Image (tube, rainbow, N blue to C red):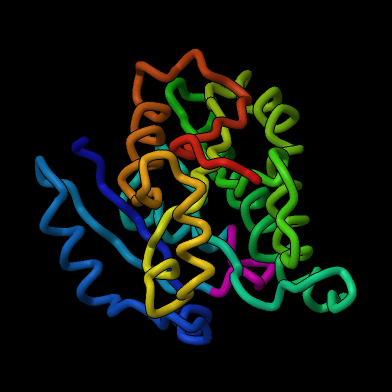
Amino acid sequence: MGASLAIHHYSPHDAEQPWGTDDIGEVVAALRGDVTGGANVHDMSLDLSDAEAADTLISDASSALGHLDILVCNHAQSGHAGPLSETTADDLDRHWQVNTRSTVLATRAFADQHDGREGGRVVWMTSGQQLGPMTGNVAYAASKAALAGLTATVADELIERGIVLNTVNPGPVNTGYLDEQMVGEAGREILERFPSNRFGEPDDPARLIAWLVSDEGRSVVGQVLDTEGGFRRW
């Protein structure tokens, strides 16, 4: 779409997951090969559980690229989320800090640098907790459900500042964690819930987000939008 990109990553978190971490150099190189019209790609590593990290994220990005028009908060804390009987205060705090607090604070910092201009866009990401249970993931579900619940309130504040906020629930999107070798029979059971017999792919929610941040999406405000490919919650 011609935009320059500031991207955030935190490999120590990813390395703890069963599917491991991507090679950051390869990811950045691929993105630099995809941008058009002389756009730039700037990357940064930050631990978003740090209370100051969200402000650093926005200030670093704007220092590298100039004024920021779009903020997409697609980061998430994974792991350390179990059933209620196993949920600890640390589990809740960890997910709150990364998934909820950093999203709200990054949005605040983005709005401050936007400074009343028209055309600002913010997209948050949730995981469909409002559509049904996410059994066995209490801390994660709590942190993401908070974003869905906050969407209308924050969107109402931002719209007068020239910024449109919406939240996207992408449904189960296979970014590697649903590969056969990772989940086996559990993954096959999830796949059966898709009428198309395919998992969501990263390009699926990306198309919706691209539309929301374009001029065509300017009148969609404060919505939680589900793009799940007909995923059946049974």
Quadrant where the image shows the N terminus:
top left
Residue 150, by quadrant, is top right
**Main secondary structure of the magenta stretch:** loop
Q: Residue at x 35, y 25 (%)?
A: 214
Left or right, 32 with reference to 206: left
Expressed as whole percent of the image width and height from the top left, the position of residue 57 reads 50, 60
- Kindly give the residue lying farthest to the top in the view shown: 219
Left or right, 48 with reference to 24: right
Expressed as whole percent of the image width and height from the top left, the position of residue 15 reads 46, 85
> Is 165 in front, or is 232?
232
Residue 108, by quadrant, is top right
The residues colored magenta run 47-54
Expressed as whole percent of the image width and height from the top left, the position of residue 230 reads 49, 35
Image height check: is 137 above or below 6? below
Expressed as whole percent of the image width and height from the top left, the position of residue 210 reads 34, 34
- Say whether residue 49 is magenta: yes
Image height check: is 42 above or below 169? below
Q: Residue at x 72, y 65 (%)?
A: 137
- Say whether residue 126 is magenta: no
Q: Residue at x 53, y 27 (%)?
A: 163
Q: Residue at x 33, y 35 (%)?
A: 207
